[in-house]
Amino acid sequence: MAEDFRCIASQGPLEGTVADHWTMIWQERVSVVVMLTNLMEDDTTKECRLLCHFQFTRWTDRAIPYPSELVQFYRTVRRAHDSQPKSTLLVHCSDGGGRTGIFIALDKLHRAGRRNGKVNVAKCLTEMCEQRMNIVENVELMSVKPIYEDSIKSTGHANIGLNLLPSVLPVFDFFCQTITDYRGLIAAQYPGDSTAGSLVRLLMEQRSPVVVTIHPLIELHSTPLWYPEVSSELSPFKIQRISSSNVTDEIQQAALLIENTQNHESHRVHVLEIMSWSAKNIIPGDTGIVATVVKEARDIRAQEGNGPITVMSFDGAAGCGVFIAAYNATEQLAVDGAVNLFSVVHDIHIRRPEMITTMDEYEFCYRVVAGL
């Protein structure tokens, strides 16, 4: 046996020695643990409890989240906690302050507001700081509000030549969140002749399994470049149509196989094309069209992988917002059993204010949700 071989014989940790067990693993630089027992032996269970674990991954140590995201997360946590009203809620971040304090304050203020009909934010935070120093660390955490940073706002004209519509400025933060995935949707505009290759690269790099086109693609000159009847080539990509079918008379579906000729990677994309939604209309004539496309997109994504769904219109906003709202409302209904359409649309507005700008669009979203 080699002289430098080291092995530690240990018993399984008891309830009071779990911390010591992990301290030993850390101090002795253990890289492999061999466990020669089952978690439960002799078919004996002393006690069993159900514990829900929620993780909010959008909140970094040096930034603050969008308020609507935090509120949505809090509502989910509160529903789970209210189902066991006598249980204790454990909240933690990295250092036990800052983010933890804000979440606890949100819970305290919400419960106080429902109980008394009013809240006193300053008093609540003062009392919490008296109980634990640095529970709220800075002014930004005390005044969480929407922030439209320069990197998110479409204020520059640098790439305006790449847009189909000159009035639409470039949007760099094109990811839109779903209820279950922060990067679950991509809102994009139809490509021009010079940007068709960029669209194909986007689909390939992001592993997007579904493309939803709000309007008929026949209206676009660039369509054959990336959406061929048989095959096309946009160096270094080769695109081949491998199947076509009709979901309904108003919705067509096709499958494309994209191959990168440089590294020989391939990716399959399903295109859902709404044939009856003219670009002249801000909403389609039938709510069932959007509901059907949402269902098809969700089913394909579940089968093909969890890459983001790409939604496209002439400006990346009109029509896209309606689909995204319907998609998120459907997901919220499936996860929570209820839908807050106002919050859904508000979240979209934070990402892209140009989406859902009319009452007709909002009412249409409501009718879609009502029909689910």
Image (cartoon, rainbow, N blue to C red):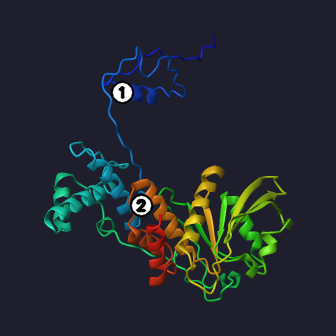
| Label 1 crowd (10 A; few <14 / some 14-19 / many >=20) | few
- Mark 2, residue position: 62
- The picture places residue 338, in percent across and down from the top left corner, at 38, 60
- Along the horizontal axis of the image, is 108 left or right of 245? left
Instruction: State which mark lies toward you, 1 or 2.
Output: 1
The residue at the point 65 percent across, 88 percent down is: 166
Image height check: is 84 above or below 187? Answer: above
Q: Nearer the viewer, residue 37 or 20?
A: 37
The residue at the point 68 percent across, 75 percent down is: 275
Image height check: is 114 above or below 350? Answer: above
Count of numbered circles on the image = 2
The amino acid type, in three-letter code, at marker 2 is Arg
- The picture places residue 122, in percent across and down from the top left corner, at 19, 67
Asked whether residue 86 is in view, the answer is yes
Quadrant of the rendered image containing residue 290: bottom right
Q: Is mark 1 in CB contact (under 8 Å) with mark 2?
A: no
- The picture places residue 89, in percent across and down from the top left corner, at 27, 46
The residue at the point 62 percent across, 87 percent down is: 280
The amino acid type, in three-letter code, at marker 1 is Val
Q: Nearer the viewer, residue 354 or 370?
A: 370
Asked whether residue 174 is in view, the answer is no
Mark closer to the chain start, 1 or 2: 1
- The picture places residue 40, in percent across and down from the top left corner, at 41, 20
Q: Nearer the viewer, residue 317 or 286?
A: 286
Toward the bottom, the furthest residue is: 167
| SS at mark 1 in the image | helix
Quadrant of the rendered image containing residue 70: bottom left
Quadrant containing the N terminus is: top right
Quadrant of the rendered image containing residue 239: bottom right
Q: Which mark is residue 136?
A: none
Toward the front, the furthest residue is: 249
- Mark 1, residue position: 18
